[in-house]
């Protein structure tokens, strides 16, 4: 694909018969800017850098670009022609990036990244094939994970995160179950519930942990555009008369072959579930539980970038220069939720900022004036997101629901009892519990269990979550075949 700066230079292009020819190894690509992640921030960064004259390659793990917010359904599906404004906006972002000359490779997960004298080498693989990228700069725009805290029964079939349930409903038009309970905290619960209804599912209830609706309304009132979005999403729930509970959390999922009911407990003034006053919501076959999002920082951590902790930003996030989106490692930029949870609009603005700054660092153009405008434009929506995130922060006492037989790390089948035993033996942080028990050492490298592990350790040690650290990644960052790794690392 050609663009403003000409084609991306490959180190070799080989046509072969997969049945008879020897495997030539991964596709090799050289570029000025490699953007990891094709969501709101990544696509905006790619378009900005390419328009500035850079050769841009975008790597994304999903089959189609767009990320979670601008999720693009399969071609020809009903969801792609129903006038969904987010689908249309996402298609526009993808088109902008491609017209600017950026090349997007979907179905590739980055499993390795290494600094070099000329920049960086990235290795990715997946359904789209293997690729070895040589880049002068890297923009990390990898988005965020659902924040989950394990509870008894969370491994039952039918229990999943809100993000997973929404993705199922939006991409396939299939609700996560016949009758679903959506629970946790955060404004994200509303669009998840609306997506389930739109897919034809029923909602048993929506359970929100926060119990200060007037405070939330005061925050939203500062942004009139949010009222319109709220009304659009809330109307289907009002029309369906979906019960909406506040001030409680799921403390157990009940069932045999799959989830059948959820046990609910109210929260006391300290945010701890009152296990003496529980009740059950039954006749469900799907349970979605999540407490907002936490930044996806595996790649920036692997590159050695500095990270900071802020609960209102999702916890641990990559430290960035607000004027350039540069990290503490030269040549590495972080955009969107990687630098702190803020939502789609701030992500797009920070992505464009990172793309312009990366291109300017390569001597391609002077973008200082536009970057200053972007910083100012991002200030208000980012402040709004920070206030909303603080309001919907996860309850402080969620670890009280974790019994000793609750599985904490699903990859390694490590229970809370084993974590507590490790703490009694001398482990005192996330890294120590990992050494003692292998918790966080499995295929997901703590993406699923990391937040819950940190909360449990902090509660047991009477520490702040910041003091127990986060799960540091190890290469490969994603599961990869040994032959793929061998071919990628062969010089």
Image (cartoon, rainbow, N blue to C red):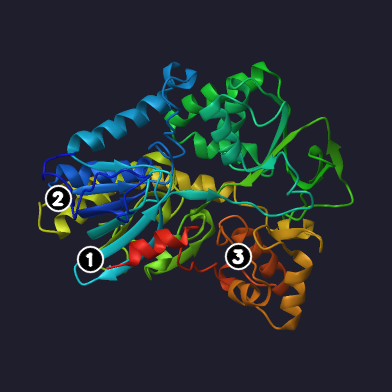
Image quadrant occupied by the N terminus? top left
Q: Of discs 2 and 1, which sits in the foreground?
A: 1
Q: Nearer the viewer, residue 422 or 248?
A: 422
Outermost residue toward the right in this view: 276
**Mark nearer the N terminus (2 vs 1):** 1
**Mark nearer the N terminus (2 vs 3):** 2
Q: Residues within 10 Å of mark 1 (few under 14, many from 20)?
A: some
Q: Is residue 455 left or right of residue 41?
A: right
Where is residue 14 drawn, in percent x and y?
A: 23, 48
One can see residue 216 in this view:
yes
**Mark nearer the N terminus (3 vs 1):** 1
Residue at image point 52% right, 22% down: 232
Kindly state the secondary structure of the residue where label 2 is placed.
loop
CA gap, disc 2 to disc 3? 41 Å
The answer to whether residue 476 is above or below residue 259 is below
Q: Nearer the viewer, residue 213 or 97?
A: 97
Question: Residues at badges 2 and 3 in contact (C-beta under 8 Å)?
Answer: no
One can see residue 321 in this view:
no
Q: Is residue 14 left or right of residue 128?
A: left
CA gap, disc 3 to disc 1? 30 Å
Q: Which residue is mark 2?
A: 367
The answer to whether residue 46 is above or below residue 114 is above
Where is residue 444 drawn, in percent x and y?
A: 56, 57
Q: Which residue is mark 1?
A: 119
Q: Which residue is mark 3?
A: 440
């Amino acid at each position: 694909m050609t663009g403003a700066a000409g084609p991306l230079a490959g180190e070799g292009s080989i046509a072969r018969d997969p049945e008879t020819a020897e495997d030539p190894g991964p596709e090799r690509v050289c570029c000025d800017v490699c953007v990891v992640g094709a969501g709101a921030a990544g696509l905006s960064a790619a378009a900005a850098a390419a328009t500035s004259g850079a050769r841009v390659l975008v790597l994304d793990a999903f089959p189609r670009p767009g990320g979670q917010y601008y999720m693009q359904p399969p071609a020809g599906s009903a969801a792609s022609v129903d006038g969904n404004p987010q689908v249309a906006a996402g298609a526009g972002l993808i088109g902008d990036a491609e017209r600017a000359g950026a090349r997007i490779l979907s179905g590739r997960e980055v499993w390795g990244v290494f600094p070099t004298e000329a920049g960086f080498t990235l290795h990715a693989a997946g359904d789209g094939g293997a690729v070895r990228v040589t880049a002068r700069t890297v923009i990390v725009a990898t988005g965020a994970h659902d924040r989950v805290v394990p509870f008894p029964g969370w491994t039952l079939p039918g229990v999943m995160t809100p993000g997973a349930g929404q993705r199922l409903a939006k991409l396939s038009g299939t609700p996560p179950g016949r009758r679903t309970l959506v629970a946790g905290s955060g404004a994200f619960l509303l669009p998840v519930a609306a997506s389930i209804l739109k897919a034809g599912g029923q909602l048993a209830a929506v359970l929100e942990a926060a119990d200060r609706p007037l405070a939330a309304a005061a925050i939203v009132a500062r942004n009139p555009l949010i009222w319109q979005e709220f009304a659009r999403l809330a109307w289907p729930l009002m029309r369906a008369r979906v019960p909406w509970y506040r001030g409680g959390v799921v403390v157990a999922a009940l069932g045999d072959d799959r989830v059948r009911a959820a046990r609910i407990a109210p929260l006391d003034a300290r945010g701890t579930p009152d296990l003496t006053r529980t009740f059950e919501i039954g006749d469900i076959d799907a349970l979605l539980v999540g407490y907002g999002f936490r930044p996806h920082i595996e790649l920036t951590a692997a590159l050695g970038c500095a990270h900071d902790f802020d609960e209102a930003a999702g916890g641990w996030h990559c430290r960035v220069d607000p004027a350039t989106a540069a990290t503490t490692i030269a040549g590495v930029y972080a955009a969107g939720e990687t630098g702190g949870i803020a939502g789609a609009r701030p992500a797009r603005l920070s992505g464009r900022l990172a793309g312009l700054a990366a291109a300017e660092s390569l001597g391609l153009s002077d973008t200082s004036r536009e970057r200053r405008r972007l910083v100012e434009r991002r200030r208000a929506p980012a402040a709004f997101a920070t206030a909303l995130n603080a309001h919907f922060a996860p309850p402080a006492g969620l670890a009280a629901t974790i019994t000793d037989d609750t599985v904490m790390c699903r990859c390694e089948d490590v229970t809370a009892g084993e974590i507590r035993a490790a703490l009694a033996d001398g482990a005192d942080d996330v890294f120590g519990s990992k050494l003692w028990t292998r918790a966080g050492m499995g295929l997901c490298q703590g993406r699923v269990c990391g937040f819950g592990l940190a909360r449990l350790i902090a509660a047991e040690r009477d520490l702040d979550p910041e003091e127990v650290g986060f799960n540091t990644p190890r290469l490969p960052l994603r599961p990869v075949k040994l032959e793929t790794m061998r071919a990628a690392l062969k010089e």
